[in-house]
Image (spheres, rainbow, N blue to C red):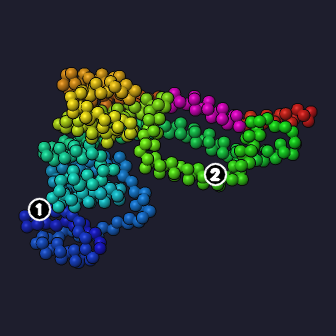
Amino acid sequence: MANYEYSVIDSDNVIHRGNIRCWFKRQANKQLQREGISVVTLARVRVQYSRWRKIFRHISRIDKIIFYRNLMTMMRAGLNLNEALASSREQSANPYMKRVIAEAEKSVLAGQPLSDALNRYPKLFPQAAVAMIRLGEHSGKLIETLSFLVQQQEGDFRMLRKIRNALVYPTLIICTMVGIVIIMMIFVIPKISQIYVDAGAPLPIYTRILVNVSMFLASNGVYVAAALLLLVVCLRAWLSRSKKFRLFVHRLMLRLPIFGEIIKKVNLAMAARSLHMLTKSGVSVDESLVLTSGTVSNLVYQQVFREAVPFVRRGVTISQILKGKPTLFLPLFSKMVMTGEETGNLDDMFSHAAKYYDEDVQHWSTNVSTLIEPIMLLGTAVVVGGVALAIIYPLWNFANIIE
């Protein structure tokens, strides 16, 4: 069966848009006319969705931001939810996102709320976003809720993009260094090692190790590359399935020098932004913690937020819980939460905390290249220079022997 997209006018001159599945276009046209409505447009939707494309389908954060913003803009302009969803689907450039919006549109046309339609895709729409939309639907403030979501998603996106941009230069330096070493090990050292073999002179221990490794890579490079690729695939599969292993990796990341502090600040900013959005909308503190646990990226923080829920329900304040985790919740964050609880402006304090850590991460991302550049250049010089010295030093000895 094929999927057809239609727009029709009912007896009250109201335009409706939707999708219908039929074998033929003529059959779809008759089915719509049978319901007593006039068909304006009817077009077949050709969605090419092969197995390979299904494996690599992906919806980025920017796709979701565009969806929220388009939905908010269309509804603010006076369109109803069905028309706003149809407009958002038409404007989306991601085929998988189009499919998700089309499914949500069908559910809404069938009488279901938007929150239930989006809740079918928990990997795309976290529980915090779904809960916010549900509150907006119940309170009649869906447009304001979507505006909150856009601000929250855009804040997270800007922060993560700055971090990625800051890490481009160090990553480029590391890749260049590794590439130079691999080229020398596979193509340069095996040819020079033949000179050592012909000369028959004794070699230093580090040169012998380098030559043996180089000969092994030159002879078995394909197998080594395949083994490394298989190892990466296995580790990634294990990381995705084993929660204990992921928790261990995430805990280890928090202990990294320099980067561990940045990871903490990024998660605190994301958590503060979500808590501000939820508490300001009227969600209870315990429920806000549950929903926020699904928005932070680090599993350690997710676990801490979930473990804090029963204590909050017993009357323990958030600031008291945060004091028990000084390595995860930085002193300033705990102090701001305590001040918010004492003054009754907890949602505003979460907003201030999010802005503070956003600015802190932005400052770090601006200066990281300046801070890391000398270290990266020194490390590259040590590695490449060490390999070159291990090759050239025996040649100097040979020259001395010949003299």
Is residue 386 within the magenta segment?
Answer: yes
**Whole-percent x, y for residue 305 in the image:** 31, 35
Q: Is residue 141 left or right of residue 377?
A: left
Q: How many marks?
A: 2
Magenta range: 369-387
Residue that appears at 65% across and 33% down: 381
The amino acid on which the numbered mark 1 sits, given as a three-letter code, is Val
Q: Is residue 128 visible?
A: yes
Q: Nearer the viewer, residue 370 or 271?
A: 271
Residue that appears at 75% across and 43% down: 211
Q: Residue furthest left?
A: 12
Q: Quadrant of residue 46?
A: bottom left
**Whole-percent x, y for residue 294 in the image:** 31, 42
Residue underneath mark 2: 224
Q: Quadrant of the C terminus?
A: top right
Residue that appears at 71% across and 49% down: 216
Residue that appears at 87% across and 42% down: 200
Q: Mark 1 and mark 2 in contact (Cβ < 8 Å)?
A: no
Q: Is residue 262 left or right of residue 125?
A: right
Mark 1 burial class by Cα count in 10 Å: few <14, some 14-19, many 20+: few
Is residue 368 within the magenta segment?
Answer: no
Residue 14 has which mark? Answer: 1
Q: Is residue 194 left or right of residue 81?
A: right
The amino acid on which the numbered mark 2 sits, given as a three-letter code, is Val
Q: Nearer the viewer, residue 101 or 115?
A: 115
Q: Is residue 49 above or below residue 287?
A: below
